[in-house]
Image (cartoon, grey):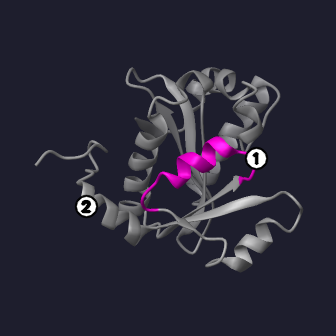
Amino acid sequence: MLKKRDLNECHELFDLMTHPDVFPFVRHKTNSYEEFLFITKQLIEAEERGELISRTILDEWGSPIGTISLYDIQENAGFLGTWIGKPYHGKGYNKLAKDAFFQEIFYELGIETVFMRIRTENIRSQKAAEKLPYIIDASASRKSLFDQLNAQGTMFKLYEIPKDLYTLHTLRTGISAETSQPLEA
C-alpha cells in the first residue's frame, strides 16, 4: 500500500498530479516532468536529513496512485499532505493510506502529533478529514498556529491528530500494523 518515494514512479505520478481536480491541492506543484523529477529527488534527500517523511501510495497491483507525506517536522510533529489521482478518488485508498502511514510514523518513527491544514475551498478533503474518528478541530486549541497559517489571507481549516487519540482508535477497532484492516474477533 505504501513505499518509500523513488524516481522510477515519477512518470505515473506526474500524469496523475496534473489532473485539474488534483493539481490545485498538491503542495509541490510542478509544470513539467523534469521539474517533478527534481522535486522528488529533493524530497528523498530531505527525508534522509529527517526533515520530512514521504511515501508513494500504491493500489492493489503495486501501481503508484498518489503520495502521502509529513512535512515541516519539528518536535515530533508535522503537517500531513496527501493527494490521490482522480481515477482513484472515492475508492477507499485515502483511508487505507492514512492508516498505514499513521502506523509507521506513530509507532516506528516517533511522531507524536500530525497536523492537517486544509484550504477552506477544498470541501472534499475537509469531509474526508472530518470522517476520521481520531481527528480534532484545532482552530481553538492551537489558536496561535491557526492564526499563523491564516495570516496571509488564504484561509485554512486546522486539524490535529494526536498519537494517543489514534492509538485509542486502533485499540477500539483492532487496526493492525500489518494489514491496516480491522482484525477479526
Q: Position of residue 56 (x, y in %)?
A: 52, 36
- View extreme (left): residue: 185
Residue 45 vs residue 11, the one in the foreground: 11
Q: Position of residue 12 (x, y in %)?
A: 61, 21
Describe the element under mark 2 as helix, strand or loop.
helix
Question: Three-letter amino acid code at disc 1?
Answer: Glu
Residue 172, relative to residue 180: is it above or below? Answer: below
Quadrant housing residue 25? top right
Question: Three-letter amino acid code at disc 2?
Answer: Arg
Describe the element under mark 1 as helix, strand or loop.
loop
- For label 2, the crowd category at 10 Å Cα-Cα, with few meaning under 14, some 14 to 19 and many 20 or more, is few
Q: Residue at x 38, y 24 (%)?
A: 60
Residue 24, relative to residue 109: is it above or below? Answer: above
Asked whether the residues under the numbered discs 2 and 1 touch, taking CB atoms below 8 Å apart as contact, a structural biologist would say no
Q: Position of residue 3 (x, y in %)?
A: 45, 38
Q: Which segment did they paint magenta?
A: 119-134
Residue at the spot of label 1:
121
Which is nearer the N-term, disc 2 or disc 1? 1
Residue at the spot of label 2:
172
Q: CA distance from mark 2 to mark 1?
A: 33 Å
- For label 1, the crowd category at 10 Å Cα-Cα, with few meaning under 14, some 14 to 19 and many 20 or more, is few
